[in-house]
Image: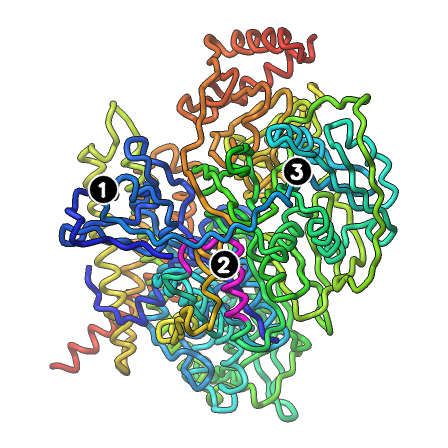
């Protein structure tokens, strides 16, 4: 693989320099030169009208065959309860499977997971339920080995999982063991039906840039998706599917790591992902004590308390409240952003909320670009008025 | 204890934009830095060395200018550093990157612990750590927030959504760490002096005796086919008037939406 | 201004600046408000090897001199002089061992000071003996292979936090100043305790306490130099440490000048930034001139000391007096540039003014030091006649 400039043909017009998405081309002595870091995206080749750019094509050993069919969703559970992201992925997976005219399956690991049969209601044609006491908790080594075994046996073409701590930890191991591609934290999934490719779009550079990624030569195509990115369909109780119970035979699989204990973090009780209203504060609050004001508003509205990153970094509020790229992704009915300027990292975590209210004294704050209703003003005046009026109702 | 810390050089800001005219990444004036998440990995490696003895080796795959970042790692306590740099490594996704790093770590010899940051600042995938563990056939724990005890194995705290798990991990192993684990130190004068003159070997594909089909773009399973700026449509309305009026207006709108 | 610093000296300055900006600046208001001793920052200074720069290599230092120390103190002080003085006071304590300690005393104490594991302190002042240092009352009575200390030292920087104290006490009350001797006393010695932390006007992050000795027995090997040399040691050591106080003053003044300039650029009055008003411009210009002049003098004196000059009493006093008077004027005027905002504790500038005041007082008041300079002048002229 490589990129070469044919110096006889290059006339230094610079067309290619402008289109390189990574800014890696430059003119040296009226000829184009390529800096380190080329992704061989071919944008320059398309722009060059003199055929001066040669990109040695990679030999694409397509291991893709008709043998790989079907869309899988890893349905994560903890303590027997299936996580919301599994239902969201099944809802999206149904769409993808329909486009591909393929089956949608859920794969669930655990012990006595009562909800597993409900997965069909969200669109799964089949549920592979691996039920055994030894995988009651998250035994990562066992999960990895078993999941790889199932993929090799049933050959899905697409595998989706939640970008939760669990998914982000064990999916890469599955992908590496299968030597296939994995795209992290996707926010968009589409199908290129002609090539049966999954077009995986994800934010990069902290959400400032979106990239669409494909995995053309390996199967399955794997992606993780953050919770609350896709909407969960209303379950269809009538929908029938097949639940296939699989044993977990330890065989040669051993778990090298041992889970000794679990310490519940009380502040983690804030279930931002599951609440209808979030009142969130940013740097504009000025100090830790001022979160009391938002707490009061949250109490009046029956809302949960969120935060952008600066208050967490300053230690005003624990990390579990953080919404955004490095915190939680939320999608409530109402999101009230107080004193939050709206850095892309924060927007990435909340912009799909149904109604967004922004209260900020800077009329140019980017938060107003995503706000349904904006109030340009002092939050220390506006919020108490809001509390007073809501209390009065 | 032989500790390897994997580092990446990244742009010093994620505030990059795409020029709407040319549709290219605007990179002017952006300095490259040590991936902030990797600073915690390096610090933890140095602290472990101070606790149990041994050596810390920093490795990075990247262009020749990443040498500068490896020198910084030495000033921050790494004993030595190796740069993996070759045109053939260009365009690598996490699969090809972890393969290349794995071959280099094997070449380094006996290693007890490999530490990575939880994710990079630019790519944000967090996949190289676990994929590297798989390539090396080593046990792995992600999101480590505390190393409690080291004897034959290690007792670690892993951050999960609902709290912390205490995990026993046999060595050798791979871990990724979160920022809660430590506060990275600043350089030392002796470290800076050492960093200035330290030899930083550059290992190419040839030196790694690597399978060329598994590195760089050729060894990557995924490929970027498009990059673009996130689209944001302003759907909003700025409420006018005195605060009293704005608040009244807002509440009536929320009432219409059936929220209050 | 080009000060012809070596690469190593620039590294010291840049690293101290980095620590100041990344670790001290975010905390300084809180440290000042809570009067909290900055242990975390001290540990960072230690791990960055800054305590090594004033200690020779054979005692695990990096072998720098007075100029290196001044560069570090100035940069730390630019952010918070409460932190800077804590650091500089350890250097002062170490200096007495370095200059007058036996090989055994140096080997035993200096490596821990160099690594930052132990802080050092220097104790001369007493309730009755400020500028009149000869009036000290603490005694050291010889007894069974050692000495018994009795008395109370006052206003001791790093008191209660340092591990190793250089204490000046009378071994012969009859001989007055000539009967004083210097001793090394460790923190946990029985009979040695500390008074309450003083509530100060400025440098509030630093710890200032009384050292109380009640029949405190120390071994003979803790005598520094010879009996009767106590005052000579104190005067010599203070001569060498005064450029450090001067550097502290330069740092405060530099910080105040920068803050005032920034403020003047963004503060709008009469529809213009106040920096466009000539009255303000002249204030800032005078401040800049004075800061640069003070720095030039301090660096020159530090270099004179590093060149091995024997008699530096006059030069060291000049640097300290000039730089501290500059710091006081510059910070006062910086508060003036800030106007009402400068008087409010939300801004860092009033702290700088409070911090500056002490540099005119400690390690020899500027009045006493002017006496010293004048007496040197007189002596020199009379020698020339």
Q: Position of residue C343 (x, y in %)?
A: 41, 37
Residue C80 seen in this snapshot: no
Q: Are marks 2 and 1 on the same chain?
A: no
Q: Which residue is mark 2?
A: B97
Q: Quadrant of the C terminus of chain C?
A: bottom left
Q: Residue at x 50, y 51 (%)?
A: B120
Element on which disc 2 rests: helix
Q: Is residue B185 above or below residue A23?
A: below
Say the numbered circle drawn on residue A56: none
Q: Chain of mark 2?
A: B
Segment tinted magenta in the rendering: B89-105
Q: Position of residue A369 (x, y in %)?
A: 45, 22
Q: Position of residue B200 (x, y in %)?
A: 39, 73
Q: Which residue is mark 1?
A: C283
Return the residue nearer the eye: B73 or B100.
Answer: B100
Return the residue nearer the eye: A311 or C274.
Answer: A311
């Amino acid at each position: 693989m490589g990129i070469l400039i044919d110096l006889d043909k290059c006339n230094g017009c610079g067309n290619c320099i402008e289109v390189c998405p990574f800014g890696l081309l430059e003119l040296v002595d009226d000829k184009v030169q390529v800096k380190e870091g080329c992704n061989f995206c071919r944008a320059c080749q398309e722009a060059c009208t003199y055929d001066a750019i040669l990109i040695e094509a990679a030999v694409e050993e397509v291991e893709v065959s008709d043998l790989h069919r079907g869309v899988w969703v890893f349905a994560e559970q903890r303590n027997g309860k299936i996580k919301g992201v599994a239902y969201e992925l099944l809802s999206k997976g149904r769409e993808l499977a329909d486009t591909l005219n393929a089956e949608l399956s859920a794969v669930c690991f655990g012990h006595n997971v009562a909800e597993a049969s409900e997965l069909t209601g969200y669109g799964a044609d089949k549920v592979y339920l691996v039920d055994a006491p030894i995988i009651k908790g998250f035994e990562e080594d066992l999960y990895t080995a078993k999941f790889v075994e199932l993929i090799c046996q049933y050959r899905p073409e697409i595998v989706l999982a939640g970008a939760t701590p669990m998914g982000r930890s064990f999916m890469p191991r599955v992908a590496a063991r299968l030597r296939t591609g994995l795209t992290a934290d996707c926010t968009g999934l589409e199908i290129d039906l002609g090539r049966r490719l999954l077009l995986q779009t994800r934010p990069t550079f902290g959400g400032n840039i979106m990239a669409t990624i494909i995995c053309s030569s390996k199967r399955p195509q794997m992606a993780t998706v953050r919770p609350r990115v896709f909407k969960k369909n209303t379950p269809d109780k009538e929908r029938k599917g097949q639940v296939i119970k699989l044993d977990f035979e330890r065989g040669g699989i051993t778990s090298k790591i041992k889970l000794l204990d679990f310490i519940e973090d009380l502040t983690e009780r804030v279930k931002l992902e599951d609440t209808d209203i979030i009142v969130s504060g940013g740097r504009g609050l000025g100090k830790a004590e001022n979160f009391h004001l938002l707490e009061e508003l949250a109490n009046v509205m029956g809302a949960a308390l969120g935060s952008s990153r600066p208050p967490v970094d300053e230690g005003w509020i624990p990390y579990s409240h953080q919404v955004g790229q490095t915190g939680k992704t939320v999608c409530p009915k109402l999101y009230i952003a107080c004193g939050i300027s709206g850095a892309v990292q924060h927007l990435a975590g909340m912009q799909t909320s149904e109604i967004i209210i922004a209260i900020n004294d800077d009329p140019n704050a980017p938060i107003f670009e995503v706000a349904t209703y904006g109030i340009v003003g002092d939050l220390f005046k506006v919020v108490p008025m809001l509390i007073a009026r809501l209390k009065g109702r | 204890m032989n500790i390897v810390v994997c580092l990446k050089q990244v742009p010093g800001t994620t505030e990059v934009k795409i020029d709407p005219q040319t549709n290219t990444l605007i990179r002017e004036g952006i300095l490259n830095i040590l991936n902030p998440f990797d600073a915690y990995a390096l610090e933890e490696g140095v602290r472990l060395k101070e606790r149990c003895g041994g050596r810390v080796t920093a490795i990075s795959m990247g262009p020749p200018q990443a040498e500068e970042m490896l020198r910084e790692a030495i000033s921050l306590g790494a004993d030595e550093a190796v740069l993996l740099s070759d045109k053939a490594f260009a365009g690598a996704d996490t699969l090809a990157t972890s393969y290349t790093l794995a071959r280099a770590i094997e070449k380094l010899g006996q290693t007890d612990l490999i530490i990575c940051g939880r994710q990079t600042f630019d790519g944000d995938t967090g996949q190289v750590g676990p994929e590297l563990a798989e390539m090396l056939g080593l046990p792995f724990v992600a999101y480590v927030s505390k190393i409690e005890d080291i004897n034959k194995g290690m007792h670690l705290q892993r951050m999960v959504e609902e709290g912390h798990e205490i995990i026993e991990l046999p060595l050798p192993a791979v871990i990724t760490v979160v920022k809660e684990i430590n506060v990275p130190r600043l350089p030392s004068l002796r470290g800076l002096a050492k960093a200035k003159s330290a030899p930083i070997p550059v290992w190419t594909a040839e030196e790694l005796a690597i399978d060329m089909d598994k590195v760089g773009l050729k060894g990557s399973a995924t490929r970027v086919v498009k990059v673009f700026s996130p689209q944001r449509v302003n759907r909003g309305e700025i409420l006018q008037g005195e605060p009293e009026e704005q608040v009244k207006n807002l509440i009536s709108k929320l009432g219409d939406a059936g929220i209050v | 201004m080009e000060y012809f610093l070596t690469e190593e000296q620039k590294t010291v300055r840049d690293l101290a600046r980095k620590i100041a900006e990344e670790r001290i600046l975010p905390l300084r208001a809180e440290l000042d408000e809570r009067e909290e001793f900055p242990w975390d920052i001290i540990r960072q200074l230690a791990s960055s090897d800054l305590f090594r720069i004033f200690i020779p290599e054979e005692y695990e230092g990096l072998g720098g001199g007075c100029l290196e120390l001044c560069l570090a103190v100035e940069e730390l002080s630019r952010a918070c002089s409460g932190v800077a003085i804590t650091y500089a006071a350890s250097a002062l304590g170490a200096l007495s061992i370095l200059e007058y300690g036996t090989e055994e005393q140096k080997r035993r104490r200096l490596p821990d000071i160099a690594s930052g594991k132990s802080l050092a302190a220097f104790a001369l002042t007493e309730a009755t003996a400020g500028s009149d240092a000869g009036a000290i009352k603490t005694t050291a009575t010889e007894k069974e292979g050692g000495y018994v200390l009795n008395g109370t030292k006052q206003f001791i920087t790093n008191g209660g936090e340092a591990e190793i104290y250089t204490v000046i006490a009378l071994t012969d009350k009859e001989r007055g100043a000539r009967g004083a001797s210097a001793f090394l006393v460790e923190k946990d010695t029985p009979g040695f305790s500390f008074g309450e932390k003083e509530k100060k006007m400025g440098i509030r992050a630093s710890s200032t306490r009384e050292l109380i000795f009640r029949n405190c027995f120390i071994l003979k090997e803790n005598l520094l130099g010879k009996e009767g040399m106590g005052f000579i040691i104190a005067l010599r050591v203070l001569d060498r440490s005064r450029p450090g106080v001067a550097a502290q003053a330069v740092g405060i003044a530099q910080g105040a000048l920068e803050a005032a300039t920034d403020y003047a650029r963004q503060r709008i009055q009469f529809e213009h930034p106040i920096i466009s008003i000539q009255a303000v411009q002249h204030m800032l210009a005078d401040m800049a001139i004075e800061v640069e002049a003070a720095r030039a003098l301090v660096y020159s004196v530090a270099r004179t000391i590093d060149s091995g000059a024997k008699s530096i009493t006059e030069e060291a006093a000049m640097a300290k007096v000039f730089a501290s008077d500059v710091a006081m004027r510059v910070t006062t005027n910086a508060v003036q540039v800030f106007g009402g905002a400068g008087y409010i504790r939300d801004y860092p500038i009033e702290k700088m003014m409070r911090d500056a005041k002490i540099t005119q007082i400690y390690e020899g008041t500027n009045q006493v030091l002017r006496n010293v300079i004048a007496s040197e002048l007189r002596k020199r002229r009379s020698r020339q006649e």
